[in-house]
Image: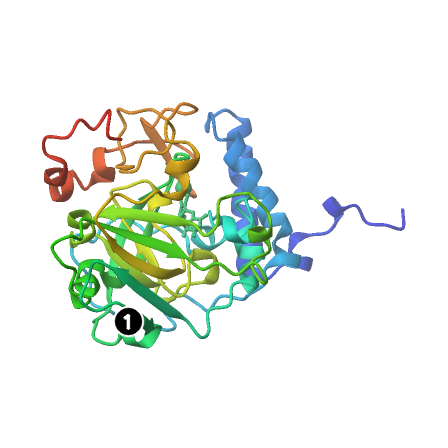
């Protein structure tokens, strides 16, 4: 045979070292799955090993070593002491539909997201609406490392060391008035570069929203980085929301607009399928998604499932925000 079958090419010939090691790990785990130790991991496993095998040709942007940019930041409030998810997993297995709909697309297409220059439009019920440059937005805020659990509604989960600050500290600077009851966020609309936005995959731009009191909670974070570096494009550079007690789709990426509103805004996933994706989207093991139970979850890089905790383990901090609400109805 003149042509090598892909299987005959050793991964070390075609991949950089961290990817090679990662792939080895996945293949090792595949062995475990076949012996039945990782029941139910099939789909995730398949998707991930596919992602890894495509990585050599497709890793559009190289990532710096962890902690190259922010070598040591003070730990922020409520940081988890749990082991963070592998940096490679957190940056190669993503949801960011603007960069494609499969888990490996965002890393592969990361170069489509143009983040310089960046500005954020602030509008609505506040004293200081304006177009702010990213520098204006960030200047007064001291950055912290906030290690938070992330739980996707699809039942995969992670522990991410974010670099950021409290969303509420930024929102206060715009002086919301007494009519402001909700905050809406919008992602960049740029179909010229973000090719997926030329399709009707979602009703672009991606939109999310919070009640103002949720947004002011100190756990609600604006992130500019992770793992001691600036945010990789696939994770929502240059500025994204992190709401750790809610399903991941609330944590909107690459924010270009913040709007203070009197009424609850329509949001992307809730408008698309209101019976599947609630506006509140608080992590709740007792309320199943129509297609999957939310009782358990699987962390990236792990093969056994964990119990899902109410509010993703942040009930002590946030449950009081929902006092008197029926969380089965207002999910
Ligand atoms: N603009 C935008 N933001 C988004 C998404 C998206 O498709 N577009 N996906 C969401 C979903 S479903 C999840 S689980 C998280 C994933 O974040 P991560 O890829 O950094 O882990 O981003 C959220 N933010
Ligand atoms: Mo998600």
Q: Is residue 70 shown to the viewer in this render?
A: no
* Relative depth, front residue between 268 and 26: 268
- Total numbered circles: 1
Q: How is the image coloured?
A: rainbow
**Quarter where residue 101 is shown:** top right
* Relative depth, front residue between 86 and 273: 273
**322 versus 214 height, above or below:** above
Q: Position of residue 260 (x, y in %)?
A: 24, 55
* Relative depth, front residue between 7 and 74: 74
Estimate how packed mark 1 is, as few (under 14), some (14 to 19) or many (20 or more) residues with alpha carbons within 10 Å.
Answer: some
Say whether residue 208 is left or right of residue 181: right
Say whether residue 182 is left or right of residue 89: left
**250 versus 241 height, above or below:** above
Q: Position of residue 269 (x, y in %)?
A: 40, 39
Q: Looking at the image, which residue is at 10% across and 39% down?
A: 320
Q: Position of residue 122 (x, y in %)?
A: 29, 64
Beta carbon of the mark 1 residue lies under 8 A of ligand 1:
no
Q: Is residue 182 shown to the viewer in this render?
A: yes
Say whether residue 251 is left or right of residue 109: left
* Relative depth, front residue between 52 and 265: 265
Q: Which residue is mark 1?
A: 137
**191 versus 324 height, above or below:** below
Q: Looking at the image, which residue is at 53% across and 37% down?
A: 45
**205 versus 330 height, above or below:** below
**Quarter where residue 259 is shown:** bottom left
Say whether residue 261 is left or right of residue 17: left
Dot 1: element: helix
Q: Looking at the image, which residue is at 41% across and 43% down?
A: 268
């Amino acid at each position: 045979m003149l042509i090598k079958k892909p299987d005959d090419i050793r991964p070390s010939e075609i991949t950089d070292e961290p990817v090679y090691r990662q792939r080895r790990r996945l293949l090792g785990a595949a062995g475990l799955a076949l012996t039945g130790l990782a029941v139910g991991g099939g789909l995730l496993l398949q998707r991930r090993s596919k992602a890894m095998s495509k990585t050599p040709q497709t890793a559009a942007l190289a990532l710096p070593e962890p902690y190259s940019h922010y070598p040591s930041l003070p730990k922020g409030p409520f940081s988890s002491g749990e082991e963070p998810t592998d940096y490679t997993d957190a940056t190669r297995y993503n949801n960011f539909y603007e960069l494609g709909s499969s888990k490996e697309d965002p890393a592969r297409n990361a170069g489509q997201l143009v983040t310089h220059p960046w500005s954020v439009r602030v509008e609505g019920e506040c004293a200081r609406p304006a177009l702010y440059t990213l520098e204006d937005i960030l200047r007064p805020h001291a950055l912290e490392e906030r290690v938070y659990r992330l739980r996707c509604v699809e039942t995969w989960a992670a522990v991410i060391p974010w670099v950021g600050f409290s969303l509420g500290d930024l929102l206060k600077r715009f002086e919301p008035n007494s009519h402001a009851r909700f905050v809406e966020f919008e992602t960049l609309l740029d179909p010229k570069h973000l090719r997926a936005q030329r399709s009707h995959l979602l009703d672009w731009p991606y939109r999310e929203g919070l009640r103002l009191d949720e947004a002011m909670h100190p756990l609600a974070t604006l992130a500019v980085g992770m793992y001691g570096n600036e945010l990789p494009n696939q994770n929502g550079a240059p500025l994204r929301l992190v709401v750790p007690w809610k399903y991941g789709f609330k944590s909107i990426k690459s924010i270009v607009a913040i709007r203070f509103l009197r009424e609850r805004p329509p949001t992307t996933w809730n408008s698309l399928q209101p019976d599947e994706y609630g506006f509140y989207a608080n992590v709740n093991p007792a309320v199943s998604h129509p297609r999957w139970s939310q009782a358990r979850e699987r962390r990236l890089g792990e093969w056994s499932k964990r119990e899902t905790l109410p509010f993703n383990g942040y009930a002590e901090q946030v449950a009081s925000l929902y006092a008197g609400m029926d969380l089965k109805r207002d999910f």
